[in-house]
Image (cartoon, rainbow, N blue to C red):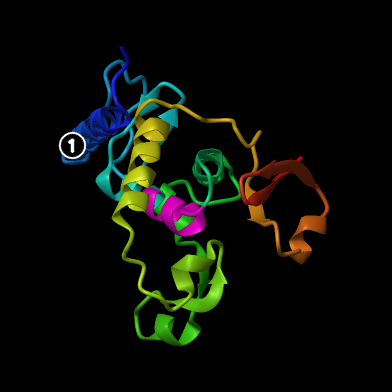
Amino acid sequence: MGISRRTEDILITIFCVGIIIMLGWVIAMPKDTVVEDAEVVVDEDTTVVDENTTVVDEDQMHCLALNIYHEARGDNFAGQVAVADVTMNRVESSRYPNTICEVVREAKLSEWWLEQGKEVPVRHQCQFSWYCDGIDDTPTNTDSFNRSILIVYDVIENNMHRGITEGATHYHAGYVTPAWRNDRGMKLVGKIGDHIFYRFD
């Protein structure tokens, strides 16, 4: 006889909570902790060294989780993973900064604030719009943010789901038509979840 749906839901919940607790332990590790067999020594701000070596960095993981949450929390799993993949593709591209947080926070900075000694992005002029839309970035949907954290763990710790976007570094929602999609060298990859993805060739 099979188990009831309620029992199944309880078991799934227990499993997910266990994974989240384990991830919490990983994030709490010292920032200079490197997985075994690392072949390259890196500083603490670098997240990915190569496909087999990962530096566990709480700040970088948090930045990626926030980007997944704000860009795709209402999307399906593939769509959320695709946002993570684009973020990591930018980290690995010479066109963009080389850490997750720098990629996520890349923006045009206010000249006035720079003169005051502060880096403040100009509203609505960020690579990822949520970062400078003037709205508090603190996640309000705990379940959605926890799902983002699990994806981050898979992507950074287990090197899973990489390549789903075939090297894409750009995407937009299906209901908008940004001018940059016609830039020279921009190639359409396809639609994943709620977004349409592109890469430079």
Magenta part mainly helix, strand or loop? helix
Residue under the point 49% across and 43% down = 84
Q: Position of residue 163 (x, y in %)?
A: 59, 30
Does residue 46 appear left or right of residue 160 in this picture? Answer: left
Report the amino acid beneath label 1.
Ile
- Determine if residue 200 is in view: no
Residue 66 included in the magenta stretch of the image: yes
Q: Position of residue 115 (x, y in %)?
A: 41, 85
Does residue 45 appear left or right of residue 15 in this picture? Answer: right
Residue bearing the label numbered 1: 21
- Quadrant containing the C terminus in the rendered view: top right
Q: Nearer the viewer, residue 29 or 118?
A: 29
Across the whole image, how many numbered discs are drawn on residues?
Answer: 1
Does residue 184 appear left or right of residue 104 in this picture? Answer: right
Q: Of helix, strand and loop, which one carries label 1?
A: helix
- Quadrant containing the N terminus in the rendered view: top left
Residue under the point 53% across and 44% down = 76
Which residue appears farthest toward the front when viewing the image? 1
Q: Nearer the viewer, residue 184 or 148?
A: 148
Q: Quadrant of residue 29?
A: top left
Q: Quadrant of residue 23?
A: top left
Q: Nearer the viewer, residue 68 or 19?
A: 19
- Determine if residue 177 is in view: yes
Residue under the point 24% across and 38% down = 20
Does residue 132 appear left or right of residue 89 in this picture? Answer: left
Name above or below for residue 187 compared with residue 153.
below
Which stretch did the figure color magenta? Answer: 65-74
Q: Position of residue 108 (x, y in %)?
A: 54, 72
